[in-house]
Amino acid sequence: MNLKGIFTALVTPFSGELLDENGFEKLVEWQICEGVDGIVPCGTTGEASTLSYEEHERVIELAVKVARGRIPVIAGTGSNSTKETIELTQVAKDLGVDGALLVAPYYNRPSQEGLYRHFKTVAESVDLPMVLYNIPTRTGVNMLPDLVARLAAVPNIIGIKEASGSLQQVADIFRLTKGEFSIISGDDNLFLPMMSVGATGVISVVSNVLPARMAALAKAFMTEGNREKARDIHMELSSIFQTLFIEVNPVPVKESLYYMGMIEDKAVRLPLSPLADSSRATLLQVLKQYGLLRRQP
């Protein structure tokens, strides 16, 4: 599997307390039509932490069904339990995904050696391409470059979604792995600078709402070699990069999709809550600026 380009970290739409299966299928089809390179269901943006096991499985199943092999499906299957991670990853494999995204175990805060053993054990237990996910602001642990280099030697660990916010860390991973290990940005606003030090793609929140423009940014830098064009697209998107994180992800992006008319319910599950009125006012203004406001508040 080629980890290059735009992989959308999909939201999970709800209808009241239930999954909105039709809405989810429409989102997947739209993403494919807009030219993204892959989709990532059941990640942070997909509210995986508040999906039941049955819902988690169903979302992955729907993503695979709609994608039909046209683009890769990389399912979030990570947990802070190694046993549970193995079980979720095996289920995802059985459902036909192309790869798994494994977040660093959260809350229990393992050491670097504990992280190594966790990921190595999962990789050896399920024969599936795996992408590490480093996001210390949510997990409480940082996967250091030396650790990533050790894990890169495990045959089916093929890359890392790097969301530490450190360009130096990205550069160190690239250097230690001799550029042979895929590095994917976990931050939309750092995608362009990360490409300059070795990243080959992004698992994107912003591509939920502007998939074609994010694809154009990747193409300008990586395919056309036109850094000035890539910079201009980055600047064009800078307002929405900021606004979709005005409050915790995925609350702003889900409200965006609702006001775009792409989903019928902007609900998030507790403990998340709807946008504050002041944040919503800012979001609506930015959506209007980008020509995305199609449903009146």
Image: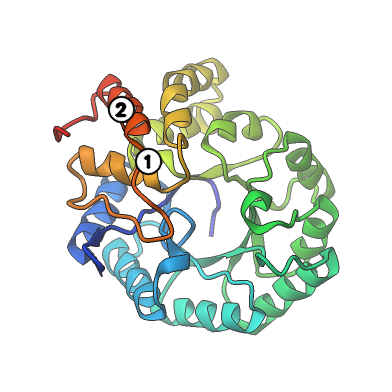
Instruction: Give the secondary structure at mark 1.
Output: helix
Q: Is residue 257 above or below residue 140?
A: above
Whole-percent x, y for residue 269 in the image: 36, 60
Q: Residue at x 32, y 34 (%)?
A: 277
Q: Is residue 150 or residue 42 the one in the foreground?
A: 42
Q: Which residue is mark 2?
A: 281
Q: Residue at x 65, y 65 (%)?
A: 106
Q: Is residue 196 above or below residue 163?
A: above
Q: Is residue 121 above or below residue 132?
A: below
Q: Which mark is residue 104?
A: none
**In this rendering, would 54 be left or right of 115?**
left
Whole-percent x, y for residue 120 in the image: 74, 74
Q: Residues within 10 Å of mark 2 (few under 14, many from 20)?
A: few
**In this rendering, would 114 be left or right of 43?**
right
State how the image is colored: rainbow
- State how many labels appear: 2
**In this rendering, would 128 be left or right of 73?**
right
Q: Which mark is residue 252?
A: 1
Asked if disc 2 and disc 1 are in contact, CB closer than 8 Å, the reply is no
Whole-percent x, y for residue 191 in the image: 57, 34
Whole-percent x, y for residue 38 in the image: 42, 53
Q: Is residue 211 or residue 188 the one in the foreground?
A: 188
Amino acid type at circle 2 is Ala
Label 2 to label 1, Cα distance in Å? 11 Å
